[in-house]
Image (spheres, grey):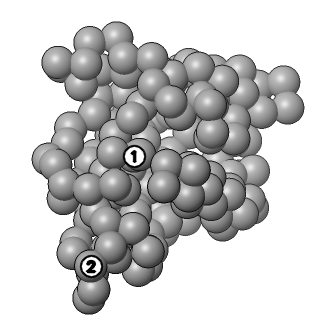
Amino acid sequence: RRGFFGGGGDNTVHEERRLVQHSREKLFDVVSDVESYSTFLPWCTRSVWLDEAKGEAELHVGFRGINERYISRVSAQRPSHIEATSVDSELFEELCSSWHLQTGPTAGQCWVTFRVEFRFKSAMYNQVASLFLDDVVKTMIRAFEDELEKAK
C-alpha cells in the first residue's frame, strides 16, 4: 500500500517469502543479533542493546548526509519469529518489521517470510522511499544472506 507521494497517511509495505538454504535456528541467530547489525547492514551505523531483557535496542541509520537514531522494541520466539517496532523516533511515524521462519522441505532449509511496514514523519522521505523501496529491501536481504554465509 502506498499513498500518493506519501500522503494520505498510508504506510508503505513490503512482504516476501522465500526458501533459504539455512536452518531456521541459524537464520534466527543472525536476525536476532542486533548488536552486529552495524557491521554488515548498509546504512546502519550503530546498533546496541539498551536493555536486552526488555528488548530495547538503539539503531542509528545514515544515508547521504541524513543521520538518524531510533529506539526499537524487539520481541522474539526462538526459532520461529522476530518482530521489531520503532517506539521512539524522529525519523519514523511507524516502523515494524517481522521475520517468520518455518521449517523447510529438507534439513538445512527454511521458509522465511519477511515483512516491513513503515511511514516516515517527512512526506519528502516517504516520496523518495517509495521510489527506491524494492532496491533497498533487496540490498538489506542480501546483507543478511551474506552474513549467513559468513556464519557457516
Give the quarter of the image for residue 135. bottom right
Task: Identify the amino acid type marked 1.
Answer: Val
Residue 86 horizontal side relative to residue 64, left or right: left
Q: Residue at x 39, y 35 (%)?
A: 33
Amino acid type shown at disc 2: Ala
Q: Where is residue 98 in the image (x, y as percent from the top left)?
A: 33, 54
**Relative to 144, does residue 125 appear above or below in the rendering?**
above
Give the number of callouts. Answer: 2
Residue 38, image quadrant:
top right
The residue singled out by tag 1 in the image is 31
How far across and down, in percent of the image, does residue 152 sit?
Answer: 48, 55
Q: Which of 7 and 75 is in front in this view?
A: 75
Q: What element carries label 2?
A: loop
Q: Give the residue at x 64% y 48%.
A: 126
> Residue 32, position in %: x, y?
34, 40
The residues bearing labels 2 and 1 have C-alpha atoms spaced at a distance of 20 Å
**Which is more foreground, mark 2 or mark 1?**
2
Q: Which residue is drawn at 18% across and 19% down?
A: 54
Query: Could you tell which of marks 2 and 1 lies nearer the N-terminus?
Result: 1
Residue 107's label in the rendered image is: 2
